[in-house]
Image (cartoon, helix red, strand yellow):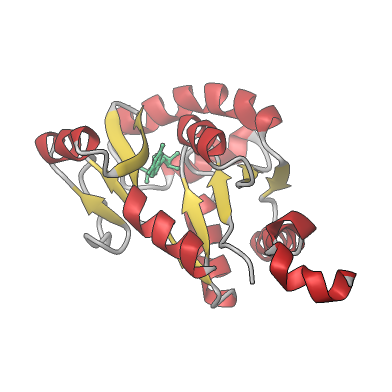
Amino acid sequence: MRKGALLIISAPSGAGKTTICRKLLARRKDLKYSVSCTTRPPRPGERDGRHYFFLSREDFKRKIRRGELLEWAMVHDEYYGTPRRFIEDQIKRGSDVVMAIDVQGAMSIRRKHPAAILVFVLPPSMEELKARLAGRRDASEIVAKRLANSRGELAAAKDYGYIVVNDALEKAVDQISCILTAETLKTFRFDPTYLAPALA
Ligand code: 5GP
């Protein structure tokens, strides 16, 4: 009836996009999650193949050379990338996919898939963002680097289709779920042969 849609969620580190994605996926059984590849080490509790595919730099670069990544970017001095095959299969199958990627990745996906739905999640304030980052068990220099990078990321929010402020988690999840529902019902997403009887 229609092809799958790509829902891209970006946010500065600590704005809550991982939790939002988890809640959204629990609520929307029709939605699939794109597991990214990264060269950064796993955080406590993160599992290979579930949260990320954790790769060596050598393996990551091999994937780039073989064209296995739909997009990739250097974020906070580590490589991150989206496996191409999974996305293409889901689109063909008509399944919608959510991906939590940075602003460079989002722009690059939009060039290849102009109908991608781009949502930028804002923290309620910079103070709250700092507090959330400090609460993680990352090393202090990693926290400082992420905070410094957040300014550039926030400046990219204006290029997104939607802004969601994460001042209340359930509300933010509701809003993104509504965006997804409305966007996937847009006329252009439907196969014209499906619409033909209605237009006759
Ligand atoms: P984290 O290390 O906190 O999980 O993610 C760091 C940043 O990398 C976040 O902004 C996250 O959205 C981004 N990221 C995660 N996966 C990908 C990906 O596949 N491609 C790109 N471009 N960015 C990603």
Q: Is residue 134 left or right of residue 130?
A: left
The C terminus sits in image quarter: bottom right
Residue 168, located in which quarter of the rendered image? bottom right
Residue 29 picture location, percent across and down? 54, 78
- Any part of residue 34 in sight: no
Q: Is residue 36 positioned above or below 20 on the image?
A: above
Residue 112 picture location, percent across and down? 51, 37
The N terminus sits in image quarter: bottom right
Quadrant position of ligand 1 = top left
119 or 122, nearer to the observer: 119
- Residue ranking furthest to the front: 200
Q: Is residue 154 left or right of residue 192?
A: left
- Residue ranking furthest to the right: 200
For the point 54% across and 51% down, the residue is 16
Residue 89, located in which quarter of the rendered image? bottom left
Q: Is residue 199 positioned above or below 78 on the image?
A: below
Residue 24, located in which quarter of the rendered image? bottom right
Residue 178 picture location, percent across and down? 74, 63
Residue 28 picture location, percent across and down? 58, 74
For the point 71% across and 40% down, the residue is 161
137 or 34, nearer to the observer: 34
Count of marks overlaid on the render: 0
- Any part of residue 176 in sight: yes
For the point 46% across and 35% down, the residue is 105
For the point 64% across and 60% down, the residue is 169
77 or 197, nearer to the observer: 197
